[in-house]
Every structure is written in structure tokens, then in C-alpha cells.
Image: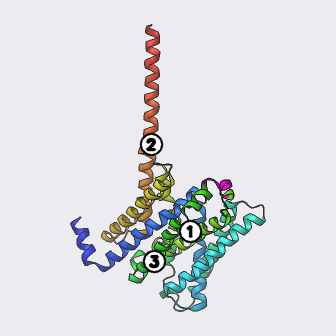
Amino acid sequence: MAEILKLFSNSYTFKVVTLGCTLLGIVSAIIGTFAVLKKESLLGDGISHASLAGICLAFLITRKKELYILLLGALIIGLLCIFLIHYTQLKSKVKFDSAIALMLSTFFGLGLVLLTYLKKISGAKKAGLNRFIFGQASTLVVKDIYLIIAVGLILIILVILFWKEIKISIFQADYAKTLGIDSGKINFLVSTMIVINVIIGIQIAGVILMTAMLVIPPVAAKQWSKKLSIVTLLSAIIGGISGAMGSIISTFDATLPTGPLIILISGIFVLISFLFSKKGIIARNYRIYIRNKKLRLQENKGDNK
């Protein structure tokens, strides 16, 4: 612990990476809670994979490796992906999950083709486009932290402002209509927040694993409560702890990638939740054991009479 505190006070890189991963873990978990409860967990997966094409196109058009330009390209393609998914679902007989799979495979395939093509262009290798596939948290600088803080705060403020509307749209869509709440617009707002969250996170977790930061903490939190506010809070705590621990462990062993470590620690929280929560395997089996024991005692009393 003393060594961690010493690193945090003396190491600029450690401080920046840890803070960035923690903030991203918290924001992703909060936004991901709505995706999980809306049963749209794969939406983040589709967007994150599609964003690779946006990054490659942004570099191909501008020939600049500035992070904000690359992320802008990812944002545009991410929003286009969201539009095409919803449009395909509404205007055809294709179901929502199939529409996501269609866009995911198409845009990710385009991204891989562009990435291969860009390797032939001078300067493309130095742009470090490959780091967006699995993420590279060590490349974070202070301005990246400011971006995560600013965007994260905006997303959290939007969640607070539209909390009632989002909650009703998720659990009582028909009732939302009677209150004059446009569920379609609220769903689009949530989808847009997922896109933005994915874009600010792909530098840390990469396009392949980013969706796990959205999905895993809420899945773990759901095992402990049914109340939305508690699930959201627990999810944020799990996401923040996972982000912090993942960055700390990767600092002590440079061979371990930060993004996968964050996902692995989140997975441990899921395992603990599945085993020890009220709805968990151990608790459920214990209740069954107690119930069967009581039944046997009652049967024995009946036989004695």
C-alpha cells in the first residue's frame, strides 16, 4: 500500500493512467446499467467494433494522428452505426440483435481492411492505430484525462436530468406514453450516451473489450438488488474499483495489459456476486437445504405421532 501511495505521488504516468481508468470504469458502469436493463448489451459491442472503421477513415482522410481527430471519426461512424441499427430494425423484419450483428461485422470488417491498407502508407505505423484494437492505457496524457472527466461529467449530468424519463421508459414503456414521455427519443439519448462513452474508452480498453466495461459491472450489481438506483451505484463502485486495480496491477508488471486486467477484475466481481449474493448459487442452495431440513423434521414429527 505504501508503495502504491509513493507511486501515486511521484509517478506522473501512474497517476494519470490510474485516474483515467477509474473515471472510465465509473462512467462506463453507469451508462452500461441502462444498456443491460434495456436488454441492449450488444449495442456497445456493435458501436465499439464499428468505431475502428471511423478511426482508420479519419487518419486516411486527414493523414493526422492527433487523438481528437481519430476519436471524432470514431464518433461519426458510431452515430451512423446507431442510426443504421435502429433504421434497419424499424424498416425491415430484421430483429434488433440481428441488426447489431450485421452492423458490427460490416463496420469491423471495413476497419480491418482499412487498417491493413494503411500499413502500406508511410507514417501510418507511427500513428499507432493498432493500439485501438486492444487499448493501451499507458499512452494516456493529462489532456486525455481532462477529456474523460469533461465527457464523463456531461454523461452523468444527463443521467441525473433524465433519470425519471429513462427509468420509466425502461420499466414502463406504455405508462411513459400516458405521461407524454417520448420513449423513442429517450432510447436514442441512451444510445447516443453509449456511443460517446465507448469513444472515450477505446484508448484504454480497445474496440474489442470496451463493451465488457459497459456490461460486466451492471451484471454483477444486478445480483444484489432490483432497485435501479442501488444497481447503478453498485455498478459504478465495481467499475471504479476494477479500473483502479487494473491500472495498478499493470504498473507493477508492464507485460500485463491494462484493459484486459480491468475486465478480468470485473469478472471476479461477477463470480463473487453469482456465488454470494441473495440470488447467488450458495445462498439459493442454502435456502433449499434449510427448507428441505424443515420438511424432514416435520415428516419425522408426523411419523412419531
Closest to the observer, 189 or 110 = 189
Give, as a three-letter code, the residue at label 2: Lys
Secondary structure under tag 3 reads: helix
Question: According to the image, label 2 marks what residue?
Answer: 278
Q: Does residue 55 lie above or below 271 as drawn?
A: below
How many marks are shown on the rendered structure?
A: 3
Sequence-wise, the earlier of marks 2 and 3 is: 3
* Mark in the foreground, 3 or 1: 3
| 10 Å crowding of disc 1: few (<14), some (14-19), many (20+) | many
16 left or right, relative to 183: left
Question: According to the image, label 1 marks what residue?
Answer: 194
Specify the segment rendered in magenta: 171-176
Q: What colour scheme was applied to this rendering of the protein?
A: rainbow
Question: According to the image, label 3 marks what residue?
Answer: 150
Which x, y percent locates residue 120? 57, 88
Secondary structure under tag 1 reads: helix
Give, as a three-letter code, the residue at label 1: Ile
